[in-house]
Amino acid sequence: MPSIKVAILGFGTVGEGVYRILQEKREEIKKSTGFTVDVVSILVKDKAKERMPIKGAQITDNIQEILNNPEIDVVFEAIVGEEPAYTYLSDAIEKGCHIITANKTMFAKHGPALLKHAEFRDVQVGFEATTAGGVPIIRTVTNLLAGDRVKRIQGILNGTSNFILTKMRDEGSSFKQALSAAQQNGYAEADPTDDVSGTDAFRKLMILSSLAFGRQPDWEDVPVLGIDHLEPDEILDASKGDLRYRHVADIWKDEKGKLQAAVGPVLIGADHPLFGIDGVDNAVIVNTEYLGQLTLVGPGAGMYPTGSAMVADLLHVIRQHEAILVPN
Amino acid sequence: MPSIKVAILGFGTVGEGVYRILQEKREEIKKSTGFTVDVVSILVKDKAKERMPIKGAQITDNIQEILNNPEIDVVFEAIVGEEPAYTYLSDAIEKGCHIITANKTMFAKHGPALLKHAEFRDVQVGFEATTAGGVPIIRTVTNLLAGDRVKRIQGILNGTSNFILTKMRDEGSSFKQALSAAQQNGYAEADPTDDVSGTDAFRKLMILSSLAFGRQPDWEDVPVLGIDHLEPDEILDASKGDLRYRHVADIWKDEKGKLQAAVGPVLIGADHPLFGIDGVDNAVIVNTEYLGQLTLVGPGAGMYPTGSAMVADLLHVIRQHEAILVPN
């Protein structure tokens, strides 16, 4: 049975999710693809930290041990922040590895360069998990693009903000109270700035822009607002008028073909597909020339949803490169 | 430039949609796949009927002229009803053609046999357009299955029924009034029996069952109800209690691993993802082990949505068989 050797960079929630799914689904993956998938190396910051038992994989804090291992076919990356993630992945591509990333901060900025580099080295880049967690928006847009044309993408791309807005509406809480509930539920980081300022949703929108339109607008030209300035009264008043605040990231081509984008809270009515999306869910609406309007709704984060998006990318890599991988 | 030769069986709304998209997107498809796609033959019932101008393709009422043409790589089928569609596609597979169908009546019953046959002959079967029109539910479930496990699928799979239920609720119309509005808008056939009796939704559910669970329940064991018995009073009373009738097709595995299915009107509350789906849209909810719950919403029918689903299948065939198709 041919084997695919993978490394996981970063072993937080997402990295652990990938590891668990690959263990739990080992037999199914073998059956459906004809390959066994073996995790041979895991890159961690602190080797001494207590973690779940790992069988058969080397735990290392030295990226060179992974990059210098010629056996490795695929590198999963689940680190936070631009660097050193970008350099690691760039080096992995140079060594001929396929890469699969969940790192939106890095990919919003360096995704286009990584994709070019990967094309040159004839390897694949999976980035489903960078945007909207378990919602397969990257694969769906990729498929649509083949014979259709995307005109606009709008979405709730930050589950933390959506949870807070839902809480403020349902319970009349202040922003601070709702944020602390989100933190208690594990839906917000200790430093929630990127989530509540709109920055996180903006990054995901830029990833979608590159995919759907082949380019990104100038970042400085995009107005980005968060939800941190909203008062409970504004939200309750909207409710009375059957309107709801949603934090929406929006990108479209105007009549002149120029890319326009905006990120911020928007008042929407009951007829809008985003009206009913409560809690930590993400939702993406895609408007195309032929299909019309398609809406996808699902979990925006979480160990298993995000991990399963990365494993789905791996299986796509396997199917695309069956012929190349077999000799291993 | 290598060329892919296709035939279209049936030139009603859907067949014409495929033809139009292939003409309009000729350059884009060439650019993205490296292949030109040429429609070389179109099978019609009545050659004398007036239709849009067709360039470069033979119009025939004789299927043998298509089956005996060794040039043809892919057969699109957009005929209505089980036969002769099944025989035509079976013969096309036997000749080594890839097939792409929108025919749910035929595929619910004969899909499993066609898929086996196609596997044996090493050709592909595209059937995205059989279920939920432009909503890419077949591709999405196929991708999910690779590394995840489907537990349940529920959906609004018949746009006509959903339009009628929406109209009855919004305007207090009787079933008959709403049906005739649907017919005037082109949303219902002259004979709407299959749509309003639940049969159409049932067939699509059986197609999803084969895909997601590898088998179908005994058809006789599945309770199938339509919307034709609902009274306006029942619908208005439900509205007052913030409930809505939706026509839902539902399939799941029970605790013993037995497939259970049901098709019929269901009262749902505002928290349910199907609550807000009005008009002719279709919606499908997929519950899986890892991803959790994913909802897709989009147009359930129409020339361009359905045609674009079939063209997406073609592009998938091209990507899968690039190596095989090149020598043409």
Image: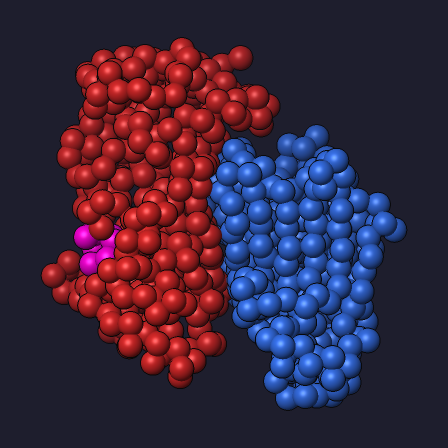
Chain colours: A blue, B red
Q: Is residue A110 left or right of residue B196?
A: right
In terms of secondary structure, what is the magenta stretch mainly? Answer: helix
Residue A217 shows in this picture: yes
**Residue B161 % position (x, y):** 31, 58
**Residue A62 % position (x, y):** 77, 57
Rendered view: B17 above or below A65: above
Residue B213 shows in this picture: no
Quadrant containing the C terminus of chain B is top left
Residue A156, quarter of the rendered image: bottom right
Rendered view: A234 above or below A66: below
Task: Please report the bounds of the magenta region as a residue range.
Answer: B193-203
Residue A183, quarter of the rendered image: bottom right
Does residue B114 show up magenta in the picture?
A: no
Depth check: give the residue in front, B188 or A63. Answer: B188
Residue at image x 17%, y 39%?
B82
Depth check: give the residue in front, A196 or B96. Answer: A196
